[in-house]
Image (cartoon, grey):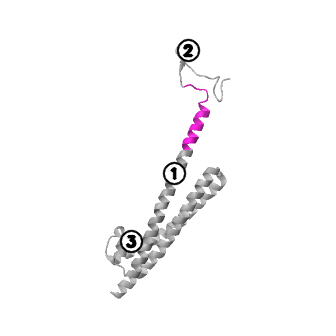
Amino acid sequence: MKTTSAGIENKVDALLACLEKDSHHIEQSLSRLNELRRLVIKHDDSALGKLLESIRVETESYRSHELSRQSILKELANIFGCNPKQMTLSAIEASLPKAKKTQVTQMKAKLRTLIEELKKEHFSTALLLSECARFNNLLLKSIFDLGKTGVVYYNSNGTTKHQTDTAFVNLQF
């Protein structure tokens, strides 16, 4: 039984190290969201492109970390004899000695706080981008519908007549 509890504690230590890296990744995501909003507001397309490329590269490299975390959770699930999808920090926490339980509880609280903050920042960024898209649509509509009243005119033959004298771009030859 001692080897099992030592194995559990070693796996929990590895999981806590993995979760610490996850918390750093979330903090970095928070700063990237702030940077994204700043660059969108400043209309800095080149810096925005560089930021998006660095996010793409980081996401690809982070994938291996996610696989290692899932592997640790599967190993813990095998030790506890349960389904890996049922393996949560609360389930792990319940079967640990007091010292490890405290570490897991602190990590769980830290991750919960960071996730709540990430949700708020994500919502703020989505709202900003939505407003930018709405504003751009209104701007384009006002430019291309310049002078159009939305009224259809018919000539004496019953065909429609377009207003070519007040359009933004007149293609009449």
Instruction: In this rendered view, identify the residue nearer to me: 16 or 160.
Output: 16
Instruction: In this rendered view, identify the residue nearer to me: 57 or 48.
Output: 48
Left or right of residue 90: residue 17 = right
Q: Visible in this render: residue 131? A: yes
Which of the two marks, 2 or 1, is nearer to us in this view? Answer: 1
Residue 1 within the segment the image draws in magenta: no
Left or right of residue 7: residue 60 = right
The residue drawn where x is 65% and y is 56% is: 47
Which of the two marks, 2 or 3, is nearer to us in this view? Answer: 3
Q: Visible in this render: residue 52? A: no
> For the view shown, which residue lies furthest in the bottom direction?
2
The residue segment tinted magenta is 133-149
- Mark found first going from the N terminus, 2 or 1: 1
Q: What separation in Å lies between label 2 and label 3 (alpha carbons)? A: 75 Å
The residue drawn where x is 39% and y is 78% is: 101
Residue designated by label 3: 89
Residue designated by label 2: 155
- Mark found first going from the N terminus, 1 or 3: 3
Residue designated by label 1: 126
State the quadrant of the C terminus.
top right
Name the amino acid type tagged 3. Answer: Leu
Indicate the position of residue 94 as horizontal and vertical percent values.
34, 75
Relative vertical location of residue 156 with respect to residue 123 in this rendering, above or below? above
Considering the numbered disc 1 on the image, is that residue within a helix, a strand or a loop? helix
The residue drawn where x is 47% and y is 68% is: 66
Relative vertical location of residue 128 with respect to residue 31 in this rendering, above or below? above
Name the amino acid type tagged 2. Answer: Asn
